[in-house]
Image (cartoon, helix red, strand yellow):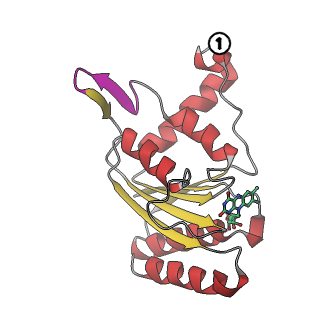
Amino acid sequence: MKILHIDSSILGDASVSRQLSKAIVNQLQAKNTAAQVDYLDLAEQTIPHLTAEILMGQNAEQSALGEQILQQYLDADVVVVGAAMYNFGLPSTLKAWIDRISVAGRTFKYTENGPVGLAGDKKVYIASSRGGVYGEQSPVDFQEAFLKTVFNFTGVSDIEVVRAEGVSMSDIKDQAITTALDQIAKI
Ligand SMILES: Cc1cc2nc3c(=O)[nH]c(=O)nc-3n(C[C@H](O)[C@H](O)[C@H](O)COP(=O)(O)O)c2cc1C
């Protein structure tokens, strides 16, 4: 089993989403000791924003990087994404990764019946952390909802969200993390 573990929080050891994503990977490894883990720390190694030059394949270095990122996503059996909510959405570093894995002909294609995902043979865990409390269906959640849409678009339907929310509120932060870790223990 190949696990792709991605973190994007800028807060290092103080990050809740990093704590949760690591706990998920540890749990998966405990269940499958042969699992291989590829790790991407997008705060440490940022992926350059997509440009027209990159999109058109006119930058050899970036084409090679894009192919590596895309192939790593395609090869993964399980993807674990640590996703902080920043300004109702994702860290821009994570969006830059998404821009490299959403590739026509590789992870999706358009047909007469609309778009079809081509990378559906994997499970995705979203380790979500946010300062406020939004729940499942908030109209201002452009973080989890966006991630789910993108992974669905590439064909993935098996998506599990592990969420700690309200972490900017000192009275509920610890309980939010405990609840998320309890969910992870059941994976
Ligand atoms: C730049 C920045 C923007 C943030 N924007 C929001 C926001 O829009 N809504 C919210 O509920 N919390 C927001 N927060 C709080 C984070 O979602 C919260 O601290 C979360 O735990 C971040 O994940 P992390 O602990 O993995 O870094 C923001 C935090 C930062 C640093």
Left or right: where 56 falls relative to 35: right
Q: Element type at marker 1?
A: loop
- Name the side, left or right, on which 30 lies relative to 98: left
The residue depicted at 52 percent of the width and 70 percent of the height is 163
Image coords of residue 18 (percent x, y): 65, 66
Q: Position of residue 68 (x, y in %)?
A: 56, 35
Tell me which residue sits at (66%, 71%) in the image: 16
Q: Which residue is pictured at 51% across the width and 42% down the height?
A: 72
Mark 1 residue's CB less than 8 Å from ligand 1: no
Q: Which residue is at the far left?
A: 113
- Front-lying residue, 124 or 180: 180
Residue placed under numbered mark 1 in the picture: 58
- Looking at the rendered structure, the number of numbered marks drawn on it comes to 1
Q: Position of residue 109 (x, y in %)?
A: 34, 26
The spot of residue 4 in percent (x, y) is 51, 54
Q: Amino acid at mark 1?
A: Gln
Quadrant in which the C terminus appears:
bottom left
**Residue that lies at the very extreme toward the front in this rendered image:** 139
Is 83 situated above or below 46?
A: below
The image quadrant of residue 132 is bottom right
Magenta span covers which residues? Answer: 105-113
Classify the position of the N terminus by image quarter.
bottom left
Front-most of residues 141 and 11: 141
Q: Residues within 10 Å of mark 1 (few under 14, many from 20)?
A: few
Q: Residue at x 54, y 55 (%)?
A: 141
Front-most of 114 and 36?
A: 114
Ligand 1, image quadrant it occupies: bottom right
